[in-house]
Each structure stands twice: as C-alpha cells, then as structure tokens.
Amino acid sequence: EQANAYMDENHSFIENYIKQNIPSVGYTRNEGTYMTFLDFTKTMASIGAEEQYKSHDKASPEHYFQDWLVHNSGVYLNPGADYGAGGAGHMRMNIASSRLVISDVLDAMADAVNNV
C-alpha cells in the first residue's frame, strides 16, 4: 500500500511539474502503474524528428528523439512507438524512483525542451 501511495504521489508531482515547467509536453495520468507516457509531439515537430529519423537510420521519429533527448539532457526514455500505434509522439518514463531523482530528470528535460 505504501508503494502504491508513493507512485500516486510521483504521478501528481510529475503532472504538476510538467504543467508549470514544460507546458509543451503533454501528460496523461496512468493509474496503477509505475510507467507513464509523456507527449513530446510538439518538441519532436520543433526539432524536425519526422524529417530526420530516416536520414539518421532510426526506426521512428521517437527513436530519433530518444537520441536527441539523451544528447541534450542526459535523460534516456523509451520510444512510445515501440508500444503500439498510440505511442506515436510519446516517450515512456519509469517513475519508480525517488522524487529527488525524478525532479533532476524533469529539470534536465525542461532545460532541453524549453530551449528548442
């Protein structure tokens, strides 16, 4: 029960952080899981992921964005496209971590995304 409560609080923390600090990123709260999907559609469009992924030998725009995000923030997220058609434009994030680590990850992503 404690783990479930902590994950629920992590979801709330992420949701509020994104609304306040990375408004171009979409967040849909998932219930009962330690994974979440973030919608980076606007960021991917800003960096030309749709046009760049093939010339960089990537499987999808999300795979191109994965490399871009690592290069620009040090954060490694999983491409949503790997999880089905509904994952287009999204990246999967594991939130089963301390809030301090999640905060550091979100800060790094915000710096990268907000400077596009």
Image (cartoon, grey):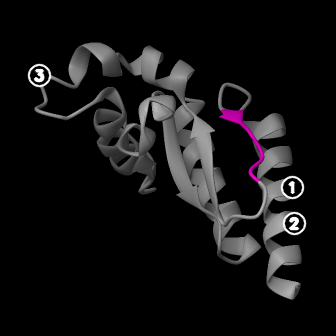
User: What kind of element bears circle 3?
Assistant: loop
x and y percentages locating residue 51 in the rendered image? 26, 13
Label located before the other in sequence (1 or 3): 1
Query: CB under 8 Å between callouts 1 and 3?
Result: no
Whether residue 116 appears in this view of the structure is no
Amino acid at the residue labelled 3 = Ser
Compared with 106, 39 (above or below) is: above
Q: Give me the residue at 34% from left, 16% from top.
A: 48
Magenta span of residues: 26-30
Compared with 69, 9 (above or below) is: below
Residue 3 located within the stretch drawn in magenta: no
Compared with 34, 79 (above or below) is: above
Whether residue 99 appears in this view of the structure is yes
Marks 1/3: CA distance? 38 Å
Quarter holding residue 54: top left
- Dot label at residue 47: none
Of 70 and 78, the residue lying toward us:
78
**For residue 17, side relative to residue 74 (left or right):** right
**For residue 55, side relative to residue 89 (left or right):** left
x and y percentages locating residue 49 in the rendered image? 33, 22
Quarter holding residue 63: top left
Residue matched to label 2: 9
Q: Give me the residue at 67% from left, 65% from top.
A: 102
Residue matched to label 3: 55
- Dot label at residue 12: 1
